[in-house]
Amino acid sequence: MTAPLLSVRGLCKRYGAIDACRDISFALEEGEALAIVGESGSGKTTLLNLVAGALQADSGEVVYRMRDGAARALSSLSEAERRALMRTDWGFVHQDASRGLRMNVSAGGNIGERLMAIGDRHYGRIRAAALDWLARVEIAAQRVDDPPSTYSGGMRQRLQIARNLVTGPRLVFMDEPTGGLDVSVQARLLDLLRGLIADMGLAAIIVTHDLAVARLLSHRMLVMKQGEVIESGLTDRVLDDPQAPYTQLLVSSVLAA
């Protein structure tokens, strides 16, 4: 039996007297999308950053199945191995696209940089890949030489997605990927993300406060409150038949809105 793509075991993180994450464990299979939901301050973004290696846990471990089949704890990787993982197998889509883009470098350059980071130096091939990915995220080819500082918020987010996916990663982290966008722009972006996740067989961990986003993009869901996972399961089951009182309150607040 193949090991999970990602295994999270007993992650804990404290800030003073506050447990931001308390003894959290879960597994993620290849091609599976997991949503982490909860109110502001519940610990969901802290958990995402712990799993992605952006924060160091106080205890617990994250184990990833590499392309050669070996399961490696992130803490055992060298700095070079960790950088290579971030450039190839993993992507990270920030809520604020400016954190994931070089704002004064052309759109094509933003996409090409990730290819160059894994050793591609052929200009024609890099530019062709950039144009292909701009088309896939519905950005006109004539904008390839424009910097993202000239783009709208929705276009920046789509460009950030292209930059992350151009190397064919197996796992993508998303922190409120539609946050701060107009409703019509959100709908277009969600439709794009759902198609890309399915077409590429991506595994994804998606932090969101929006239960509609979780339903549309994820197979499974973790519900967090005060640093703990209080409910988990298949997304439709959790949303249609919530068991924990807190989850019931979250769902009912959406229905009442």
Image (tube, rainbow, N blue to C red):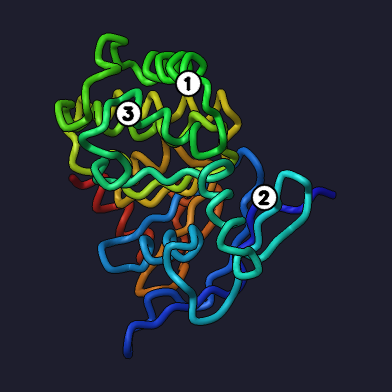
The one nearer the camera, 39 or 16, is: 16
Labels 3 and 1: the sequence-earlier one: 1
- Residue at the spot 29% in from the left edge and 33% down from the top edge: 157
- Residue at the spot 35% in from the left edge and 32% down from the top edge: 110
> Closer to the observer: label 3 or label 2?
3
Residue linked to disc 1: 126
Farthest right residue?
Answer: 1
- Residue at the spot 58% in from the left edge and 43% down from the top edge: 89
Based on the displayed image, in which of its 4 quarters is residue 217 positioned? top left
**Residue 42, position in %: x, y?**
33, 68
**Residue 252, position in %: x, y?**
29, 52
Judge whether 67 appears above or below 110 on screen: below
Q: Are marks 3 and 1 in contact (CB under 8 Å)?
A: no
Disc 3 and disc 2: Cα gap in Å?
A: 26 Å
The dot on residue 252 is: none
Disc 1 and disc 2: Cα gap in Å?
A: 29 Å
Residue linked to disc 3: 158
Q: Residues within 10 Å of mark 1 (few under 14, many from 20)?
A: many
Report the side of 44 relative to 6 (left or right).
Answer: left
Secondary structure state at the residue bearing disc 1: helix
Secondary structure state at the residue bearing disc 2: loop
Residue linked to disc 2: 5
Looking at the rendered structure, the kind of residue marked 3 is Arg
Labels 1 and 2: the sequence-earlier one: 2
Looking at the rendered structure, the kind of residue marked 1 is Ile
> Closer to the observer: label 3 or label 1?
1
